[in-house]
């Protein structure tokens, strides 16, 4: 008695268990066929042909039904640093002549993330015992991931019998240290003139920002002689100028979410929410009614928990440096893992060649974390922080800062800053006063 198991009409090689050869007597034999790990290729009709001296007889057919699609490999969770690549991959096998992949991020379809587009796939269509089996691999890649790319990812695979979804996987992106807030407090109007505050946004994507000129509310922090009603005139990269005064009371909660302190309802401070393209902007601060007083310009990165690659990379303020509350204060906030290297310059003598007649002759910088001074400098060529004058000059050149003369009394700080809030106080040696430009550069 010979047994031969069949699958979809094709003899299964070696599937002859229980077969016996004998010349006399009756034969009572049993044959079994086992599949240790079934896949979609094993679906279909099974029977056993039994051959003896009297001929061949077929057993009753048994139909084996399996899922029409099997995930051979599911995507795996990933955790990367900002700017690192993300690679997700799924392999699927199905009883189908077609297979279509579509990747999703947080439940939303990713445009173009399909088979044959931005998703690369490879595989072959094989005939397995008369059944068409498609085995394909699809990948989704992010060459340089940012926090906007963090979240849950799935891939939906559509075959002839329907659509199947992979298990959701998490992609986390840890932001590297970057600036999320810049601020400058200066006297403005009258003898102090009009401060000009410039800043640069970098990256490939637009940057949502909150820009504020705070005058009246400074009084609640103990600052005297504040500007009564500041306004902002924003000079854009295309040469246009847009004025802003007052602030949207219905966006108070959004200001808090951006990290800004609250403004009292009805205050005469100025604030606006904008989305800025990459480039150089200049904010001109003045009083609506021509008055004078201390004012603080603030710029907040308002991209929230999932920013792209847009960043605040440079800020500068040209204004009057006085004493006490009228000194110049530049604040910045660092967020993210690791450190960011920042170049801070207080230039007074270096302005003379640009025709500034009242430039302060000997500015100095003191950098604070809370109430603790962590860095400082008087004359930039005289160093006590481990940096050399040659290093300062080289870094200044690399970020595009204008040259200052060797041996000048301009002041420069170069330091790595970890996550936290910092303030650079600019004063004159011996209580001298005058105009200075304070610059802050992120060093790549």
Image (spheres, rainbow, N blue to C red):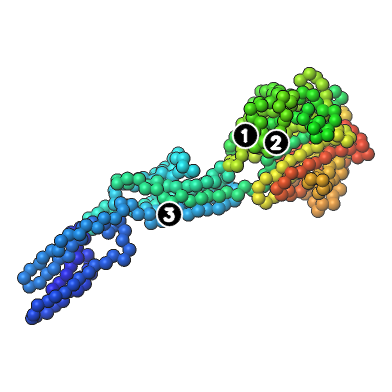
Is 146 on the left or on the right of 324, as rendered?
A: left
Mark 1 or 3, nearer chain start: 3
Residues at badges 1 and 3 in contact (C-beta under 8 Å)?
no
- Label 2: how many residues lie within 10 Å, few (<14), some (14-19) or many (20+)? some
Tell me if mark 1 has few (under 14), some (14-19) or many (20+) residues whose alpha carbon lies within 10 angstroms of its own.
some
Q: In this rendering, would 114 be left or right of 226? A: left
Q: Nearer the viewer, residue 410 or 327?
A: 327
Left or right: 81, with 340 as reference point: left
Residue that mark 3 sits on? 74
Report how far apart the C-alphas of labels 1 and 3 lie in the structure: 36 Å
Between 216 and 273, which is closer to the camera in this rendering? 216
Name the front one of labels 3 and 2: 2
Give x and y (percent) for residue 109.
45, 40
Residue bearing mark 1: 208
Write down the quadrant of residue 19 in the picture.
bottom left
Q: Eyeballing the image, is 228 above or below 368?
A: above
Rendering coords of residue 426 (x, y %): 84, 38
The residue at the far top in this view is: 289
Residue at x 88% of width, y 29% of height: 358
Q: Residue at x 70, y 44 (%)?
A: 334
Badge 3 marks a residue whose secondary structure is: loop
**Disc 2 and disc 1: Cα gap in Å?**
14 Å
Front: mark 2 or 1? 2
| Quadrant placement of the N terminus | bottom left
Query: In the drawing, what numbered circle is on residue 260?
Result: 2
Q: Quadrant of residue 412?
A: top right
């Amino acid at each position: 008695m010979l047994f031969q198991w069949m699958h979809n009409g094709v003899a299964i090689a070696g599937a002859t268990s229980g077969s016996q050869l004998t010349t006399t007597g009756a034969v009572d034999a049993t044959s079994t066929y086992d599949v240790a790990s079934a896949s979609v290729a094993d679906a279909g009709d099974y029977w056993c042909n039994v051959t003896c001296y009297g001929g061949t007889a077929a057993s009753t057919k048994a139909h084996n039904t399996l899922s029409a699609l099997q995930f051979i490999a599911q995507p795996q969770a990933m955790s990367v640093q900002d700017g690192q690549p993300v690679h997700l991959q799924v392999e699927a096998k199905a009883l189908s002549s077609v297979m279509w992949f579509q990747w999703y991020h947080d439940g939303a379809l990713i445009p173009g993330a399909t088979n044959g587009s931005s998703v690369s796939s490879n595989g072959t269509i094989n005939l397995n015992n008369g059944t068409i089996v498609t085995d394909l691999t699809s990948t989704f890649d992010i060459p340089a991931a940012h926090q906007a790319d963090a979240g849950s990812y799935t891939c939906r695979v559509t075959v002839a019998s329907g659509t199947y979804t992979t298990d959701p996987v998490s992609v986390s992106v840890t932001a590297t240290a970057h600036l999320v807030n810049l601020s400058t407090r200066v006297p403005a109007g009258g003898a102090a003139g009009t401060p000009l505050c410039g800043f640069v946004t970098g990256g490939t994507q637009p940057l949502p920002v909150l820009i504020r000129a705070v005058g009246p509310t400074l009084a609640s922090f103990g600052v005297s002689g504040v500007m009564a009603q500041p306004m902002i005139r924003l000079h854009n990269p295309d040469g246009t100028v847009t004025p802003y005064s007052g602030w949207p009371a219905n966006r108070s909660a959004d200001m808090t979410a951006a990290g800004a302190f609250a403004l009292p309802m009805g205050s005469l401070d100025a604030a606006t929410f904008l989305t800025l393209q990459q480039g150089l902007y200049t904010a001109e601060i003045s009083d609506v009614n021509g008055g004078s007083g201390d004012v603080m310009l603030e710029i907040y990165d308002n991209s929230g928990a999932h920013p792209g690659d847009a960043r605040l990379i440079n800020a500068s303020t040209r204004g009057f440096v006085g004493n006490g509350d009228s000194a110049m204060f530049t604040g910045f906030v660092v967020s993210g893992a690791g450190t960011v290297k920042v170049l801070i310059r207080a230039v007074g003598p270096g302005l003379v060649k640009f025709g500034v007649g009242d430039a302060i002759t000997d500015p100095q910088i003191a950098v604070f974390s809370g109430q603790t001074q962590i860095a400082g400098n008087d004359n930039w060529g005289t160093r006590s922080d481990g940096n050399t004058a040659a290093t300062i000059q080289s870094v200044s050149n690399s970020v595009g800062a204008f040259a200052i003369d060797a041996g000048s009394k301009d002041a420069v700080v170069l330091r790595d800053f970890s996550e936290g809030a910092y303030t650079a106080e600019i004063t004159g040696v011996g209580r001298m006063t005058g105009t200075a430009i304070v610059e802050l550069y992120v060093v790549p």
